[in-house]
Amino acid sequence: MGRKNTETVTIKDISQACGVSISTVSNVLNGKTNKVSAVMAKKI
């Protein structure tokens, strides 16, 4: 991701690494996994 180890990882960073939208990452982090496959939720 090109970040130093001391920097905070953002939802945007996670979404780019997983190839999904920021909304998808937010949904998974907030427990709304019914809109996301189990495989993708685990990846996030």
Image (cartoon, grey):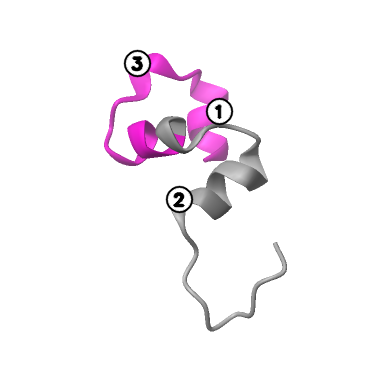
The type of residue carrying mark 1 is Met
Of pointers 2 and 3, the one earlier in the residue sequence:
2
| Tag nearer the camera, 2 or 1 | 2
Kindly identify which residue carries mark 3: 34
Mark 1 lies on a secondary structure that is helix
Q: Looking at the picture, which amino acid does disc 3 mark?
A: Asn
Residue ID at (47%, 38%): 22
Residue situated furthest bottom in the rendering? 6
For the residues carrying marks 2 and 3, which lies nearer the camera in this image?
2
Q: Main secondary structure of the magenta part?
A: helix
Image location of residue 18, percent across then percent down: 63, 39
Q: Residues within 10 Å of mark 2 (few under 14, many from 20)?
A: some
Stretch in magenta: 25-44
Q: Earlier in the sequence, mark 3 or mark 1?
A: 3
Which residue is at 70% across, 62% downward? 1
Q: Would residue 42 be found to the left or right of residue 26 on screen?
A: right
| Dot 3 alpha-carbon crowd within 10 angstroms: few under 14, some 14 to 19, many 20 or more | few
In reply to whether residue 30 is colored magenta, the answer given is yes
Is 19 included in the stretch rendered in magenta? no
Q: CA distance from mark 2 to mark 3?
A: 19 Å
| Residue at the disc numbered 2 | 11
The image quarter in which residue 5 lies = bottom right
Residue 2 horizontal/vertical position (percent): 72, 69
Q: Which residue is mark 1?
A: 40
Q: How far across and down, in percent of the image, does residue 9 sit?
A: 50, 64
SS class of the residue under badge 3?
helix
